[in-house]
Structure formats: C-alpha cells, structure tokens
Image (cartoon, rainbow, N blue to C red):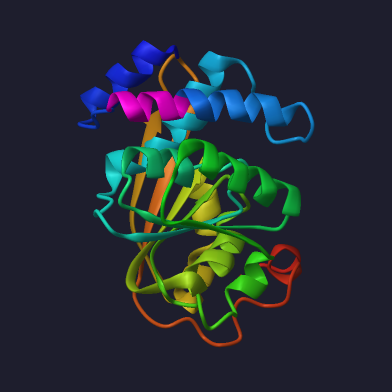
C-alpha cells in the first residue's frame, strides 16, 4: 500500500489526514527502519508493507470503535507502537499509555514520540501482569488494546484488569477468531468482560483476514487477577 492509497483508504473511512499527520507517518517509517537495524522491532521493513500491515492495520480499530477525543488508552505489549501510535497520530487528543516488557522497545518508543512531537504519551517498562496489579493503573483506562500479543484467554487476563468498568477492551487478531473465543468464554466472564461484537474483514490487496473483538468491561476484575508473570500464558483461565 503506497502512501497515496493509504491516505485514500483512510479517507473512505472518514479519517482525513492533515499534512502534519502524513509527515508523522513518514517519520515513523524512517525511524522504525533506522532503529530496526540495531534491534529487532519488526520483520516487515518494506515501505508499502509497513504502511499496510502496521499503520493501516493498526488504524482499522477506529473503523469499528469510536475513539472519543480525550479517551485514555493503554496498549499492552505494543512492541514498536502498534496499534496505539498510529491511532494517536490520527486522533491527537487521545491519552496513550504503553506497557512493554522489553526496555529496548521502550527506549525506541520514547525516541519515536520525540521525533513525532507527540503529547500525552507515556511508556512503562513492566510486565503486564504486574502493571495490572498497580493501583495507580488498575481499572483506570477507557480503552485497553492489544494486537496479536497472545491467545484471547491470556490477553483477557492481561488487559481486562486495566480497563475501567464501562470501558472497552479491543483485541486485534488474525484469522481463526471463533476458536479462540470458544476457549476464552470462562476467562472473559471471570474477569468481568462481556463480548459485544466481533468484526471480521479482509486487509486490502489480499493480505488476509483480520478480526477485531470488542469487549465491554461490565464488572470489577477479582483482586487475584492478573496472576504472577508467566502464569496466564502457562495456565490460561479455562
């Protein structure tokens, strides 16, 4: 997806990019490729692929969920900043918090935020299991996002504790979502989540199926969750 197609595809979804935002995506791409030479941020470095499989793919969450102007978003395991940084570029009023377990990725994200001149973005080097226990952050975010981080049953335990009651957990996944959801019903219910909708669509240019699950935080997450680091992945709630 070249830059013009990227801009036009977003336009068709009602997202109009300013010259500043277009330039921010260009800087994002250049910074990502530059830093990727010294650390493993992404296997995708071709410009058209980055615009499609990272930038556009991240923004698809906004096609199905209305990001209100000053919503607070926590992005769990964002890696090189996906999906929250592309969303932040498109919706500058968002308040973004990213938590990632690797310090080198946090270093990259801090540098990226400076290059993009982003306000209201904060980055934390922490395990999601510990971050979700922190009373400063627990059940405090309007929206919690995760993109292709782990199985839905595991993601629910990492993300729902951070979501305020009435807030939304958005899981961005590839194909075979039905099977994942079948195995995550107990986890969602235990953690206070209610599945609202699954949006299934194809990425442009025959780049495969994507699924976006929208989960409403209906009730408080029990204090015992999330469990200790590594436990959710080893023994998911089932």
Please indicate whether residue 137 sits to the left or right of residue 229 in the image: left
Camera sees residue 220: yes
Q: Is residue 8 magenta?
A: no
Pick out the residue farthest to the bottom: 223
Along the line of sight, the residue nearer the viewer: 16 or 121 = 121
Quadrant in the picture for residue 227: bottom right
The quadrant of the image that shows the C terminus is: bottom right
Image position of 84 with respect to 7: above or below: below
Quadrant in the picture for residue 148: top right
Image position of 237 with respect to 197: above or below: below
Percent x, y for residue 173?
51, 43
Along the line of sight, the residue nearer the viewer: 53 or 26 = 26
The quadrant of the image that shows the N terminus is: top left
Percent x, y for residue 4?
35, 12
Q: Which residues are magenta?
A: 18-25
Percent x, y for residue 205?
44, 14
Percent x, y for residue 18?
27, 27
């Amino acid at each position: 997806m070249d830059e013009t197609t990227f801009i036009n595809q977003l336009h068709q979804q009602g997202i109009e990019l300013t010259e500043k935002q277009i330039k921010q995506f260009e800087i994002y791409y250049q910074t990502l490729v530059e830093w990727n030479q010294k650390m493993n941020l992404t296997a995708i470095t071709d410009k058209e692929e980055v615009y499609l499989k990272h930038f556009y793919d991240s923004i698809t969450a906004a096609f199905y969920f209305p990001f209100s102007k000053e919503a607070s978003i926590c992005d769990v395991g964002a890696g090189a900043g996906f999906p929250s940084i592309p969303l932040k570029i498109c919706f500058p009023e968002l308040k973004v918090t990213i938590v990632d377990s690797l310090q080198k990725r946090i270093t990259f994200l801090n540098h990226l935020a400076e290059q993009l001149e982003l306000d209201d973005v904060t980055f934390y080097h922490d395990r999601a299991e510990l971050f979700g226990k922190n009373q400063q952050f627990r059940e405090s975010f309007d929206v919690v996002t995760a993109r292709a981080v782990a199985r839905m049953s595991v993601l629910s335990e990492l993300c729902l504790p951070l979501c305020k009651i009435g807030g939304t957990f958005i899981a961005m996944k590839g194909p075979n979502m039905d099977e994942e959801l079948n195995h995550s019903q107990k986890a969602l219910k235990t953690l206070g989540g209610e599945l609202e909708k699954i949006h299934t669509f194809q990425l442009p240019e025959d780049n495969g199926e994507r699924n976006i699950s929208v989960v409403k935080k209906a009730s408080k997450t029990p204090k015992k969750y999330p469990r200790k680091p590594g436990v959710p992945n080893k023994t998911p709630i089932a």
